[in-house]
Image (cartoon, rainbow, N blue to C red):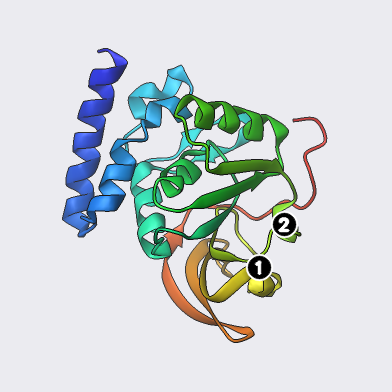
Amino acid sequence: MNVRLAEKEGFASLFLRLRAEGLADKALLTALELTPRTVFLSAAYADAAYQDRLVPIDCGGFAESADLVARLITALMIEPGHRVLDLGTGSGFLAAVAARLAERVMTIDRYKTLVQLAQQRFAHLGLGNIVSRQADGLKGVNGEGNFDRIVATCAFDGMPRQFVDHLASGGVMLAPILQESGRAQMVRLTKIGSRFEREDLFEVPYKAFIPGLAAAL
């Protein structure tokens, strides 16, 4: 099966699963359709691109499923004109989909290899409104002003209060928080004044943040 046909059939399956979940926002579905997922995975995993499962990527990481990306983007409630911060670039797929809905996306990862690969993929797709950086996600980014939306794909030990100052008033952050069970719960944090209002969403497969930059990768 050629890649184009695999993309078409894969997206059709994804579309049906998302509709069954009630995720039928036209802007989201269009953003997903315009962002070929096979571009973000190695050829060895092309057949798994649209399966609802984790897929291995470089640097010992994994790409979450397109289904989960759709749930996260929906929970973020991105609007035109928004500035988005993506903590944990991974394959770059989430940042690419978000960039089709937002004005600007900044994505950071501790692994230089992942940042460089993502930059190549963004350029290939003509996504000029994404800035990629190698950085320590736990520290966020300085000198970039406030963001309307923040999404993290690594888990925090507790409430990530250090990001209150990174959010615009009324801004939203999606943050996985580790539970006593060792599993991570995705929570939606809305900035109200100088505090967060918390809403628990769903369990996610993300692992704990590792501080600092990767030494070799």
Q: Residues within 10 Å of mark 2 (few under 14, many from 20)?
A: some
Marks 1 and 2, how far apart at CA = 8 Å
Q: Residue at x 66, y 44 (%)?
A: 109
Q: Is residue 162 visible to the viewer in this orientation of the structure? A: yes
For mark 2, give the secondary structure: loop
- Identity of the residue drawn at 66% across and 68% down: 166
Q: Nearer the viewer, residue 71 or 208?
A: 71
**Figure disc tally:** 2
Q: Is residue 186 left or right of residue 65?
A: right
Name the residue located 24 percent from the left edge and 57 percent from the top edge.
23
On screen, 160 above or below 193?
A: above
Is 155 left, or right, of 124 in this rendering? right
Q: Position of residue 79 (x, y in %)?
A: 39, 61
Task: Name the secondary structure under disc 1.
Answer: helix
* The N terminus: image quadrant: top left
Q: Nearer the viewer, residue 7 or 80?
A: 80
Quadrant in which the C terminus is drawn: top right
Q: Are marks 1 and 2 in contact (CB under 8 Å)?
A: yes
Amino acid type shown at disc 1: His
Task: Give the vertical position of 165 relative to 122 (above or below).
Answer: below
Q: Which of marks 2 and 1 precedes in the sequence?
A: 2
Where is residue 153? Give x, y as percent. Answer: 55, 53
**75, 155: nearer the viewer:** 75
Q: Which mark is residue 166?
A: 1
Give me the residue at 26% from left, 47% from top.
Answer: 29
Q: Amino acid at mark 2?
A: Val
Instruction: Identify the residue under disc 2.
Output: 141
**Does 27 sit left or right of 198 as displayed?**
left
